[in-house]
Image (spheres, rainbow, N blue to C red):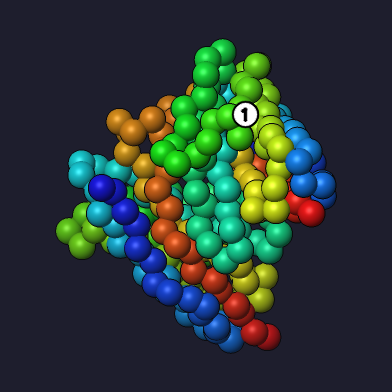
Amino acid sequence: GAVVSQHPSWVICKSGTSVKIECRSLDFQATTMFWYRQFPKQSLMLMATSNEGSKATYEQGVEKDKFLINHASLTLSTLTVTSAHPEDSSFYICSARNPEEAAQETQYFGPGTRLLVL
Amino acid sequence: GDSVTQMEGPVTLSEEAFLTINCTYTATGYPSLFWYVQYPGEGLQLLLKATKADDKGSNKGFEATYRKETTSFHLEKGSVQVSDSAVYFCALVRGNQGGKLIFGQGTELSVKP
């Protein structure tokens, strides 16, 4: 149980286009999902917390108009990188908590999406 | 603020060697502690966790003990395999922080046959 998927696993796009990344919880309903960004050989940087049915909470320094997050259902959150530029190239990882777990602290991570903007 | 510090990598070991990856943390209260593993090109997988002092988390031969007196959560394995080659992340979460994970910088482990 507690499987999280992401789609696509990798994407190459031209500068100026927008890219949508999907994060799904496959066997549980997730009221909260998290979006991270990871640069090569570095740790994960939390970008935002995605809450089902409400606006996402962005971390300091993350442009909410650049990285649009929609959590329209209990099993799906999407991250849209708008007007992507080469500096947006990165590995994007989502995670979700299972509210049915007593502690609700463990995050289950998706496999990641590698974005390359040309 | 809360933080996690891991030993720097890369760590290179021969197969069947003993592994220790040090992790220390700074946090108020009683955080839960985690070890996640990231295989090349993949997302993170939960390896083990401990939620209170003196708890020992264990999985797949790995173990770590929550030491509040030394604010540590060192990862150990008695005999590593080539398949253990990955990046290991220590992390903490405080219950009143909305479940936000705070990660260490990661330690790359390379196991040679």
Residue B32: x, y in percent?
34, 44
Residue B1: x, y in percent?
25, 47
Residue at which label 1 appears:
A68
Name the quadrant of the N terminus of chain A: top right
**What secondary structure is found at the residue carrying circle 1?**
strand
Q: Nearer the viewer, residue A15 or B15?
A: A15
Q: Tell me the crowding category of disc 1: few under 14, some 14 to 19, or many 20 or more residues within 10 angstroms, Cα based.
A: some
The quadrant in which residue B63 appears is bottom left
Q: Residue at x 43, y 53 (%)?
A: B103
**Would residue B26 appear left or right of B21 to someone viewing this image?**
left
Q: Please say if A38 is above or below A76.
A: below
Q: Residue at x 50, y 49 (%)?
A: A45
Q: Residue at x 51, y 79 (%)?
A: B11
Q: Nearer the viewer, residue A11 or A30?
A: A11
Name the quadrant of the C terminus of chain A: bottom right
Residue B100: x, y in percent?
41, 38
Residue A50: x, y in percent?
54, 27
Which amino acid type is shown beneath numbered disc 1?
Answer: Leu
- Res A108 seen here: no
Query: How many marks overall?
Result: 1
**Would residue A97 appear left or right of B84 to someone viewing this image?**
left
Q: Residue at x 49, y 69 (%)?
A: B107
